[in-house]
Each structure stands twice: as C-alpha cells, then as structure tokens.
Image (tube, rainbow, N blue to C red):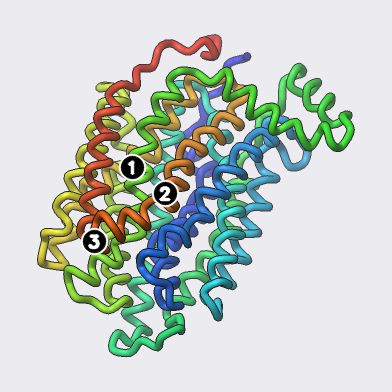
Amino acid sequence: MSKKPSLSFWQILNMNVGFLGIQYSFGLQQTAINPIFLYLGAPEEMLPILNIAGPVTGLIVQPIIGAMSDKTWSSRWGRRKPYFLIGALMGSICLFAFPHSPLLWFAVGLLWILDVGNNMAMEPYRAFVGDKLPEKQLSLGYQMQSLFVGAGILLANGSIVLFQYLFGDETVEVAGTIPQWIYYSFYIGAFLSLTTILWSVIKTPEIPPTDDEMDEINKIKALPFLQKAGKPFVEIWDAIKEMPKFMWKIGAVYLFQWYALFIYWQFTTPLFMKTFNYSTSEAASQAAKMSLTYNTVTMIVALMLVPLTLKFGGKKIYALSLLGTAAALFSIPYIADPNLVLIPMVLFGIGWAAMMGIPYTMVSKVVPQERRGVYMGILNMMIVIPMFIQTLSFGPIYKYLLGNNAINAILFAGVFFAIAAFLAMRLNITKSVYEEES
C-alpha cells in the first residue's frame, strides 16, 4: 500500500465533526432515555432489559455495515459516506419523535430504530479515520473523535440542565407524561445528527480504492442477489477466524468495562433518587450534571492523551484511566453533597477519553486496511456483547443479589472497572504485519 499523506490539524477536525451529532444522540440515550422510561411507568428493575436495543442493534448492524462499507465505492458518494448519511437521517427522525412517545412500548420501539441509525452512522466513522490517516496520525485522529464524544454528550446534557432550569417545574410530575422541557434537547439532537454529518461529508474526500480493491468490489457487484446479500456474513466469519490475538485480549477488557458502563448509565438516576431523596426530574438533572462534568473533562484531556500515549504507551495510560474510573464509582455513593459528587467525575472523564480513543488507535494498527471496516465492526461487537449480557443478567442481579439498591449497583460497576484495568495491562502490541510501507 502506498503511503498516505499527512493531514493538517483542521482537516482531521473537519473529518470528525460528524461525530458531534452522533454522540449528542448517544448523550441523550445515556441521560434522558431512562428517565423517559421511568416517566412512562417503567419499574427500575426493567431498565436493563428496556435498553437491550443498543447491544442487539450494535451486534447485528455494526459488523454488517462495516463489511458492506469495505466493499462499497461510489465516485460521487465514496465508501463510508453513504452509510453515515442514511444512519444520520434515521437518527434525526427518531430524535424528533422520541419525546412525543405516548406509551412505554412506543418509546422502546423508537429506541430500537434510533440505535440502528446511530450504529449505521458510527461504525463506518471508525474505519473512515483509519482509511484517511497514516499510522503516525492515528492517535490524533481517534483522540479527536474522543474529543467530539465529550463535546456531543456535553451539549446533550447541558441542554437538559438548561431547559429544565428555564422551563421545568420540579414540584409537579404527572405520572405517564414526559415533561415538555425535555422536548427541546431532542429537537436540537435531530438537527445536529444530520447537519454535522453533512459537514464532514462535504469537507472530507475519501481515498479511492486501489485497483485490486476495485476489482474485488466489481466482482461482488456481479454476484447474484442472494450471494451478494450473504457476502457480508462470510466476510465477518472469515475476519473472526483470522482475528489478531490482540483483539481477543481487548475483548476481555471490554467485557468488564462496558458491562460496568451500562450499569452506571442506567442507575445514576435511581442512585440520586435514593442518596439525595430526589424526584425523578431532580435525579435526572443531577445525572445530567455528572455527565456534563465528565464530558467537559473528556474534551479537555482527549488531545492531551496523545503525547502521553506516545511517551508511556497506550496500555499503561488506558489501564491507569480505567483504575481511576473505578475509584470514581467507589466514592460517588458516599458523598452527601450534590456539588461535591461532581469531583469524582474528573477521574471518570479521563477514563472516558481514554476508552473512546486509545483502543481504536491500537486496533487500527494491527488490522489490514482492506478489512478495517469489518474489524471495527467486530470491535463494536466486543462492546455490545457485554451490554447484551448486562441487559439480560443485571435485572435479576440487581433485584436478588444487590437488594434493589442503586448504591450497590454503582459499587458493583466499580469492581468491574478495576478488573478491566488489570486486564488492560496485558495489551501488548507487536509490530503489525499490515503496517504501511514507508
């Protein structure tokens, strides 16, 4: 493969702007979706299973879209961009409709469609960065995505806090009704989901396939429909069989890391309802403030991690960040002041910045260019499988082992982060056989 040209800082920023809209949507999912379920009458122990849309759609959609985008090329639209646009359009429509959900089942159904759209937009984005950047700029590219992860979620949660302050009535909650002040955050998300993706699509040209890649794409186009439809599944299976050992190791880290993250996102609102005796709206607002804090930290430190990982190595920074996240969760339930409880979010924000950047940099260095899309999809499978396990298993764990106590749920998540930190120290990268020729 010929050497890719280095891009300027602003070119790398422009290519990642679309991540802002995608992550705004995920920010609403982390903070606003579960309170909406509670408003519509969902019991706390049902929250994990009601969130099963995320892991199921991620498990199915991302590897398939990754495999398809590897074998796609349009002289007008490119390789990854068509999937960005379709996913962003689906997400935009769902975000506009979500706060109007009249019943719980309607909201749950919309979450499924929203997750399909978000996963369809996000997966090719990971491969897009690897396609465009030489290896020496991969860390900057993926940490730039981490910055936009923080920015998107920051804006989402900041809007929730702002609109509740401006339009919310914290003294009145009507059972079965979603407060109107939540609507505005979703409307902003519907706008950003589409416009930020369009910015990156317009500003960033894709690198055309090589002659060999184009021959392979044309061969697939010439196949009968059924064979063509089955090709992504064959690609996924072949990629799993030939997957680098490093990816199996990172899968072990992800098992504990993402199980713990899903617990945190689901149970921060119930936690503050218990520890501070808050109403659902007050607890949701406090959870949004927590997310505001850690995503602000993520924005600040994301690019600072680039020189640190180059100096000390990705696995050390990653493991230390996970350990800091564990410490944050161990402390949160025992802080009695709603303002002081924001302090542990500094450690959580550093961990979140590392989680959303460092693993992708590592994996991008050890997978072949022509399979980057499908391997980024498989990496996402390693995210959603723990989430899927969590949605099925944690409801009974919460009810029968943790005593329906949100404090115990958060401490449980802290233990899993500590285990993930230990496993991260096993992530040794050897020189890739797929490394670009200089």
Picture quadrant where residue 419 is located: top left
- 283 and 433: which is toward the camera: 283
Mark seen at residue 403: 3
Tell me the kind of residue under disc 1.
Ala
Q: Position of residue 186 (x, y in %)?
A: 50, 70
At horizontal 30% and vertical 66% (from top left) the residue drawn is 269
Measure how far apart labels 3 and 1 are at the Cα level: 32 Å
Closer to the N terminus: mark 2 or mark 3? Answer: 2
Question: Relative to 332, is 41 on the left or the right?
Answer: right
Which residue corresponds to mark 1? 353
- 150 and 389: which is toward the camera: 389
At horizontal 37% and vertical 32% (from top left) the residue drawn is 358
Residue 292, can we see it?
no
At horizontal 62% and vertical 25% (from top left) the residue drawn is 371
Q: Position of residue 374 (x, y in %)?
A: 61, 31
Measure how far apart labels 2 and 1 are at the Cα level: 8 Å
Closer to the N terminus: mark 2 or mark 1? Answer: 2
